[in-house]
Image (cartoon, coloured by chain):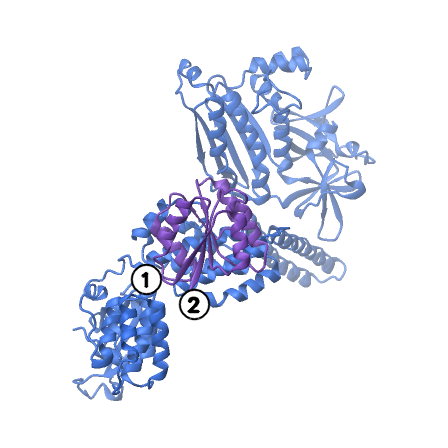
Amino acid sequence: MRDTAWLREVPEKNRRELYTELVEGGTPAWQLCYTPAADAVARGQDPLRLVRDLPGMRWFALDARSGVPDSPDSGPSVCRLIVNVIVVASDPTMSEALASEGDRAVVTHLAPYDLCFPTGEPQPQDWPAEVEVRDLLKRKQGLALWRVLAAKSKETAESSWQASVLRWMCCVLESVRPDQELLEALFASFSTAYFQAPVAAPAATDRSTLSPKEPSQTSELRGHAALLVQAQLALLGPVGPVGADALWPGRLHAAATALERVFRAVGAAELAAKISEAVAAALEAGAATPLRTLAEEALRSWQGVPDLATSKFAISASEHPAAAVPAPARNEDVERQALRMLKVEPGRIDSLLGLVGELAVAKNSLPFLARRAELDFGSRQLAREIKERYAVINRITEELQSAVMHVRMMPLAHVFRRFPRLVRDLSAKLGKLIRLEIVGEDTEADKGIVEELFDPLVHLFRNSIDHGVEMPDEREAAGKAREGLIRLSAQHADDRVIIEMRDDGHGIDVERVRQKAIEKGLASADDLRQRSDDDIIQLIFAPGFSTVENVSELSGRGVGMDVVRTMVTRAGGTITVTSKPQEGTTTRITLPVTMAVSRVMIVEAGGTEVGLPFVNVRETVHVQPGDLKHVGQGRAIVLRGRLIPVWPLAELLALPQTETVAGEGTSVLVLRVDGHDLGLAVDGFQETVDVITKPLAGVLGHLELFIGTAMLGDGRVLLVLDPKEIVRCL
Amino acid sequence: MRRILLVDDSHTVRMYGRSILTSLPEVQIEEAQNGIEALEKTIAQKFDLLLVDVNMPKMDGYTLLRELRSRPALWSIPAIMVTTEDKEEDLRRAYAAGASFHLSKPFDPEFLRRSVALLLGEGA
């Protein structure tokens, strides 16, 4: 069944290379004997193509088979081939194409020993320096032996049997763990010209069994080598350009030497050869990246080693503390994932985003062009075509925009994973028992948002741990579990991301907040007594408010909830707190998922146009003159039973107020700011546009009333108002 | 012939290291008792690998490594740092100073032998 005679056709050089590959690598080799059907070619198959395309194909040889009848209908295309193939692959089923061939493709395991046999014509020749060689062989002095053999093989006629034996012995010696028995067998065959592979050879035992997972000594060595390579990554220091580090060139050279030697030790000569080039490139670039890349390449390629975990060494290595530090890549999954990731400097994405923004604005000029085509040039046909093209460009631009936005997205896990430690440390310090539950850490948001989030959350955690969750005994007395729970969750809601932090502590003491607010004179005592508990709780966001008398080490650093709110607001978010006595406090932060592009509604007021963020726009209404009621000093409208105060926008902006034509009514833009509705009387509404708002800079930089400016499609500049600032002006 | 320098103030540790490493083929082992002596030896003679203890009188392991890594003639020599405990901070310091690898006492002889062999460019 298993015929390896054909291997004699494989040139010795190829067999030696293959032998080395099998001994060093973890991937097993297979012999495939493929006999295509007689009518294969007639049916349009291409057996050779199939063989050539096999993954891991190393060699194939053709043979003709006898006994194929020349039937009249098969004609000249009858296929009489037998194809013998050597494949190196972890999975012998190899390809689906072959699987469909069924019995016609027979796969058998190929051991390294199958490939090792000397060839050539024996010459009448004695062993050169036989005694010395025998002695070196016995003492296992691999390197010295190799030197002698390599020298002798040059003195021997190349095509002779003896030269072949010498070459094979060198080849075996070059492997990571020279096979002593094989060497002795080869040594014996030198003078006898008859080679008998060792019987008790390790490879021979698994000839019949398909057990490529057997931990080999090679893989142990590679596991150890991987540790050393990882240590070099630690030596090279952090990724990126080096600063003023006088030791860096030295560390680079040290790492290069170590890598070169380790690569050589495990037979990765091709990697070792690239080292000096990488060092030169690294020195030129001032960053270790070229060398790092080589090291990572090695680690990656060694992952193919059969199951490191099962090898004896790998266990001792993982027990060995050395594995802990220089092994950031110890977790193979993480490593693999990281390798598939592309690291891009944030600045590049931002400039890409900027360009997309410009494009979005530039495309907005097309509707203006269409209008001109119709009005100025009287071509309705052209106007329609421009509008059609615009629709296409618009769609593509939107997709492009969201694609680029997506690049900037990162999971909240980046921030969230820093909290378990914080909670553990703080609660331990205070002697509290607190369990942290994190939900939805894979929720994604814009990088800028995610980064902004850390500080406010740290503050909230400190608050909860310090003031929220009670001491274990206190909790037990209140009938709660001794262990407190803080739950941090994130989820998407439309284009916002909601982050909620909930503790099961004693909640906010509303009476104390009320008392404190009266003391601080935040509002009149009467007013405060009338307000609902929920309203009172919001007072903790007032600047300078702090309910805890004794400033504790953890949370009383003069940074109150007002700072948290400022940070959240700056990122374009909102924050609310709800609390129930004895049940706990919930803080909810709502943030935009992306921050770069915003939708703005354009309104007219006092003969000019201003923009307002669309997120704040509740609705637009047109009210009859009689419906605008005077309430005290101001005016208001009643909308679905709710009284909404209305201010004329032109007046607020100190713009000349346009005369209202009697009986025309007023346009009111209803905004919602921090949970309160207010109306702005405007002269008219225009379209909403996607714009990139750029903050005001220079002499206008101090104008807080405006979020910034935006370029419109026709080249005009639009000032975008900040609704929160409008409220402060009232 | 590859030359290894064992740098440790303890005679016992040096003997132990020597006994493990002599089984490597074609290796010659030299010893030094502290950083200064080690530095003088590496400047005067050629070494292929150093095994350096962290704590030593006169000049400690970190300083020795920094001295090595700042001299172009010596900076390519791989050096294994032998630490007493695996505090993350210590290890970071070791690699920042220029360690090629680290082992913590007590170490497995086979682990040491193999680490040295690999750093000398040998499979076995």
A51 is higher (above) or lower (below) than B98? below
Residue beneath the point at 41% across and 13% down: A477
Tell me if residue A39 can be seen.
Answer: no
Q: Position of residue A617 (x, y in %)?
A: 64, 36
Residue beneath the point at 54% across and 59% down: B44
Q: Which residue is mark 2?
A: A269
* Residue type for callout 1: Gly
Seen as rendered, the residue at the extreme right is A656
Quadrant for the N terminus of chain A, please. bottom left
Front-most of residues A718 and A20: A20
A527 is higher (above) or lower (below) than A708? above
Mark 1, secondary structure of its residue: loop
Front-most of residues A710 and A563: A563
Q: Chain of mark 2?
A: A
Task: Note the chain letter of the blue one.
Answer: A
Q: How many marks?
A: 2
Q: Label for residue A202?
A: none
Task: Note the chain letter of the purple one.
Answer: B
Residue beneath the point at 18% across and 87% down: A71
A431 is higher (above) or lower (below) than A424? above
Residue A499 relative to residue A146: left or right: right
Q: Position of residue A629 (x, y in %)?
A: 72, 24
* Residue type for callout 2: Ala
Q: Position of residue A251 (x, y in %)?
A: 55, 54
Q: Which residue is mark 1?
A: A26
